[in-house]
Image (tube, rainbow, N blue to C red):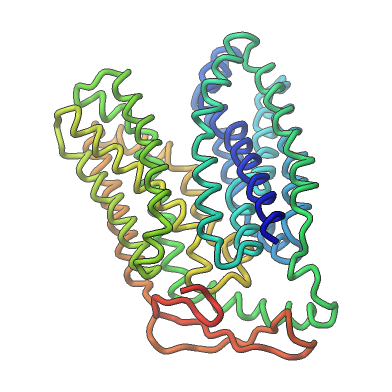
Amino acid sequence: MPGSRRGVLVTLCVTVTVGYGVLYYAFTVLAPAISEDTGWSHTAVVAAFSVGSIVGGVGGVPVGRVIQAHGPRTVMTLGSLLGTAAVAVVALAPTYPVFVAGWVLAGVASTGLFYPPAFATLTEWFGERRVQAITTVTLVAGFASTIFAPLTSALDGAVGWRRTYLLLGLVVLATLPAHALGLRHSWTGATRPADAARSAAGSRTSADRQILTGRPFVMLTAAGTLTALAMYASLVNLVPLLTSRGLSTSLAAWALGIGGAGQVAGRLAYPALSRRLAPTTRAAAVIGLLAATLAALAVIPGPASLLVGVAVLSGAARGLFTLVGATLVTDHWGPERYAALSGVYNAPVSVAAALAPALGAGLAAAFNGYGALFLVLAGLAAAAAALAVRSAQPASRRSISVPDAATAPGTACSVAVMLRSPHPGCGRET
């Protein structure tokens, strides 16, 4: 269905960009204005946002199971509705507890508006072209900050932060018909006959349990969590690090922005990287690149051009890691249970991303400097790379019986789950 797949891709490019632009990047612009207007401390305002991010990460686990069983249309359409309501609650909050409640609701909405449900959709409907489709969405959504940060700043200057959020809520509302009309294709789990579905449910629950408790999944999830901590803590603290090395605030901000261009460049290179490197090698290499750039930023005193260049390379590593996480489940265990398994993987990774800014600030204060902070973050990333290497699956295979949607009820196919081989299992793209 080339034409209809193109429509799905366009839909998700637009709606994911809006989701991140309104529910994430707008806050980074409006947080100071919110604190100044309400009298709530900046720490309290950021804490409310972090609580919502944690809720979104944990909520991705059950939402992933729902998508696995019924497809993305209902979840993502409901995400649009809840996102609109959440932004309205935040905008109109008369007290801090209501403000926190608004961000909790935004966290729930993010489970239907951010990357994970989009990646699950593309993995199911694009088959062997899923890497190109996922890369396209991340390239477009990578401009969410470029679009929404200046837009939010302009609106705030004109009408204030509360009306800005109300106007942005209307933008989120526009994604509701896009999800309802653009995601109407059949879903394998939803179209399987009832008896086969019941049989598959029990077998796949058992298969999921073996994967989720297995050494490869546990170690890759731990690697992703440590990488998220290092990545987001370094991102938030990059400007203070650069200014401590003598760069002006303006030049440091430009370095951060150019690092965003590095993310796009990294994502453009990912399809070629995925063809040339085995999944485990690819993950370890990308995380290792991040560790090396963080260590370099920690110890290089200058000149400014060299620091900016390393910041751009670090941005490329961040961009690559987004796609490593997006393709990890399919690379190792196939696309059949992507939504359910990736929901579990993304939960601790999202929580780590939410806690990373506070952790980074605390470590910088404890070490009385940003150079020491970046050395610690480089160590975390290096440990993550080592975990990715150790997750490499052995050549022996253990077959897990999982009913195939294409077979008659009661018939099962043997899905070979490779516990250490870097190559995908049966029926998967190599």
Residue 73 shown left or right of residue 307 in the figure: right
Q: Nearer the viewer, residue 35 or 228?
A: 228
Q: In the rendered view of the protein, which quadrant contains the N terminus?
A: bottom right
Rendered image quadrant of residue 151: top right
Q: Residue 210, how many percent across, how many down?
A: 56, 79
Residue 298 shown left or right of residue 260 in the figure: left
Q: Residue 240, how many percent across, how many down?
A: 30, 27
Q: Is residue 286 visible?
A: yes
The residue drawn where x is 50% and y is 52% is 135
Rendered image quadrant of residue 273: bottom left
Height in image: 108 above or below 43? below
The residue drawn where x is 24% and y is 36% is 309
Extreme residue toward the top, this view? 158
The residue drawn where x is 20% and y is 43% is 296
Extreme residue toward the front, this view? 3
Height in image: 66 above or below 290? below
Residue 104 shown left or right of residue 246 in the figure: right
The residue drawn where x is 80% and y is 47% is 181
Q: Residue 56, how many percent across, how many down?
A: 62, 47
Height in image: 368 above or below 223? above
Height in image: 345 above or below 257? below
Q: Nearer the viewer, residue 368 or 54?
A: 54
Q: Residue 112, how many percent across, how many down?
A: 68, 48
Q: Is residue 55 visible?
A: no
Q: Nearer the viewer, residue 354 or 181?
A: 181
